[in-house]
Image: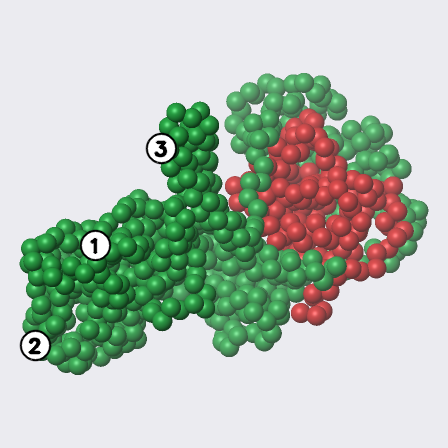
Chain colours: A green, B red
Amino acid sequence: MIDDSMKEIVNDFIQEALELLESLNENFIELEKQPDNKEILNTIFRAAHTVKGSAGFLGFQNIVELAHSAENILNKLRQGEISLTSEMTDYLLKAMDALKLMIITVSETGSEGEPPEGNAELIKKLNALSEGMGMETAKPASASISAADAAAEEEKRAVSEKKESVSTPAEAGQGAEEQSPPSTAAGNPPSGKKKARTLGDILLEDNLISKEELEEIYKEKEEEEHISPHAEIPEIEAEEIVYPSVSGEAAEASAPPAPAQDIKTAAAPTPPNKPIQQPAPTVQPVPVQQKPAPVPAQAAEIKETTIRVDIERLDNVMNLVGELVLARNRLFNISSKLEIKYADDDLSSALAQVVAGLNLVTTDLQLAVMKTRMQPVKKVFSKFPRMVRDLSKELNKDIELLISGEETELDKSVIEEIGDPLVHLIRNSVDHGIEDKDTRKAGGKPERGTIKLSAEHEGNYIIISVIDDGKGMDPAVIKRKVVEKGVIDEKTAAGISDKDALNLIFAPGFSTKDKATEISGRGVGMDVVKTNIQKLNGIIEINSNPGQGSSIILKLPLTVAIIQTLIVGISDEVFAIPLNSVVETLRIKESTIQTIDKHEVINLRKSVLSLLRLRDEFGVAGNGDEDAVHSTGREIYVVVVALAEKRVGIVVDNLYGQEEVVIKSLGDYRLGYKGISGATITGDGKVVLIIDVASMIDAVKVK
Amino acid sequence: MKKNGDRLKSVPLKKDINMALDLSMKILVVDDFSTMRRIIKNILKQIGFTKVDEAENGEIALSKIGDGKYDFVISDWNMPEMNGIELLKTVRANEATKDLPFLMVTAEAKKENVIEAVKAGVNNYIVKPFTAEILQEKISKIFPD
C-alpha cells in the first residue's frame, strides 16, 4: 500500500515538477529584459526550491544537488548580493534543462540512476558563478550553505539527543524542567493544560537558545512593532500591539502572572505599564502586520477547483458522445419524415419538439466534452521565447518573438502534434528569414527582427501563424534550387507560378542553404511540418514578399473524432468529404477544363488546380450519358480540397449538403482502395464512406 | 535513492510518544506544491493522524482556518503571494485563531529565519526533508501532555 502511494507521489512529482520547470522558460526571458525584477527572481528561486524540497523527500539526491546549486545563485540574486549576467542565465537555463532531463529519467526508469554526464561540472560552474561573481568574495556561497546545513544538522542532532533522553512522556516533562529551568521562568509551566508551546519555549527547553537571547528577540519584536506601524491609529495601537506578541500569549497561557511580567518589563522598557490582558473587541480589527489581513469571510468561497483525469476516460466519454451524435442524427431524420407524413398528428409534432431539445443538448454535450480535452496553446508556445533567445544568440542576431493568443485552446491530440512543426517554422524564420544586424541596417530595417507567433479561433478551426519581417522567400531561387536538387525538371519548374513555387519548400530534401547550418537547413524540417499538419488534416498557406518577410499560416481543425462533412454524390453513390479540408466549391463549365501533361486542370485565380474525377477514381458506373456529355458545355461541381500546402479539385455530380458525422474506422476492411478514411452512418441510416483527402491528393500526383 | 526513499516508507513509531498526541486532531497542510502536500499528508497518516486537510495557498488556508475547525496548521514557509510567515501573522492577528498551533516547514534553519519565526509566533519549525519520526517529535514538542 505504501509502495503504491509512493508511486503515486512520484508520478505527481514528475508531472508537477516538469510543469513548473517548463513554465520557467518564460520567466527567464522576462528576466533578461528586467534583470532586477525581484518578483521574477523570486518565482524562479521558488521553483528551484520547491523541486529541491520535494525531491529531497523522494530521495532523488542528484536532483536535490543540482537544484540546490541553482537555488543558491538565485537566492543571492534575489537578495541583491550579486547581479545577473548573461552567463548566469545560460547556466541557470542549462540547470533547468538538466533538472527536466533527470526528472524525465525518473519517469522513464522509475529511479534516478546515475547523474547525467556533465552534471558535476554544471554544479561546479553554478557554484563558481555564485561565488566568483559575488560582491563579497570573503563570504562565498558554500559557506552560507554549509552554515544552513550545519544548522539543520545541529537541529537534527538536537532532536535525536532529545529523543534519547525522552524515553517516557513523564520523564520528558521532568527532564525538560530540570535541564532547563528558564522555561518556567519564561512563563510556560510544563504542568499547564493542553496549551501549545511556542518555538521560543521549545528552543529554550532544548537549550538551543539562552533565556537572555530569547528575551532579546521578544524585545526586538516589540520594538519593531512599535516603530514600524505607520501610526494610522496611534492611540489604540500602542495597546493592541502587545496582544499578538509572544509575551502576551505566554501570559495568557494560564501562567502565573509574575514571570510573564518579568519578561514584559525586560522586553518592553519603553511603555512599562501595559495591561496583560487586553479587551478582545478592540484588538480584533487591527492586525500586527502592515498589510491588511485578507478577510476570511470573503475568501471562504475559494475551493480547489481542478482534478486530474486520466485521458483514457475522456476518450471513452468522447466515444460515447460520438454514438449519441449518430443516434441523434438518425432520430432527427426519422422525426422530420414522420412530421411530413403525419403533419396533423399531435404525436409527430411532439416528437419533433423532443428531438429538437435532444438536438440542442447533444450539441452542448459534445462541445462540453470537447472542452474537457482542450488545453491552451500556451503549453506549446511557452518554449519558443527561450528557443529564439538561444538561437539568435548563437547566430548573433537580434530577434524579438511576439506571441499572441496563447490562451487559445486546442484539443490535446492537436497540441501534441503541432509542437514539432512550429519548432521548425520558427527555427527557419530565425535562421533563414531574419537577416543579421548589418544586413538589416543596410536594408533600412530596424536592427531588431521580429517574429510574430499567434493563435486564434476561426469557426471550427484554429489558425496559427508564424510571421517574420526577414528577407522573405524568392520564388526564382526556390525554383533554381529544386531543379538543382533534381526534385523536378527545368521545364516543369518554368511552368510553376510564383505562388505555387513557395510550396516547393515542403518537397523532401529541399534546402535553400548551400551549407546546412546546425540549426536548420538539413532539408528535413519542412517535411516534418508538412507530415504533421497533414496528419491533423490541417492546411498550410505560405505568403512571402522578398525583402519584407514571410508568413506561414496553419489552419487546423479543432477536433478529430466528430467532424463536419460535405455530402457529395456521384450517380447514386454518396460520399462524405471532411469539411475541414474543403476550401470552396465551384460550379464550372466542362469546357473550361484544360489538359496539361494528361492532367485535367483548371485555372483558378491564377493558380493551376489539378482535377480528379471521383467517378473514375472509384470506378462508379455512370447512368450511361456521362461519356457523351464529357465534352459538352455541361456544368459540373468541383470541390476544392486542401491538405497541408496542396490543393486539388474533386469533380462530383451532386452536392447534397453538410452533416456532422462520427468517423468509424473500417478496421480490416480495406476495400482494395486507400481513398477511404472511414465510414459513418448518416441521419437517413445510410452507411457513407468518408473520403481520405490525403490519398486523393496523392492520386493526382501519381497520374 | 534507497537510503532516502525510505523516508516515506513506514517507520516504527514510538508508541509512547504517540500516546501523548491527539491523533484525532484536525490538521491543515498548506503548501503551493501539490506533491509536497501529498508527501506531508502521507507522513501524517503514517504517524496516525486521520483528519488531514490541505490548502494550496495562504488565501485558501485563511478561509478554511476562518471556520475555526482546525486544531493544527502545518505550513510551508516559502510560498508565492502570501508566504508562511505572513499567513502565520494573519492567523495570530485574528482573535479567533491567535492561539492556533502552527508548525512551519522550511528548507533552511538559519538563525535569522528561526528568529523571524519566533517573532511571528510560530509554535515550532521543521526542516525539509524530514521523516515521520522527526515530524512526530516536532509535533509532540508543541503539545506537551
Q: Disc 2 designates what residue?
A: A491
Residue depicted at x 43% and y 30%: A348
**Could you classify mark 3 by the number of other residues whose Cα lies within 10 Å: few (under 14), some (14-19), or many (20 or more)?**
few
Q: CA distance from mark 2 to mark 3?
A: 60 Å
Pinpoint residue A125: horizontal percent, then vertical percent.
47, 70
Q: Indicate the secondary structure of the residue bearing disc 3.
A: helix
In front of the other: A573 or A438: A573
**Residue ID at (56%, 69%):** A108
Mark 2: which amino acid? Lys
Res. A466 mark = none
**What residue is at 21 percent from the left and 54 percent from the top?**
A653
Q: Identify residue type, mark 1.
A: Asp
Please tell me how many numbered marks the rendered image carries.
Answer: 3
Q: Chain of mark 3?
A: A
Q: What residue did someone put label 3 on?
A: A340
Q: Secondary structure at mark 2?
A: helix
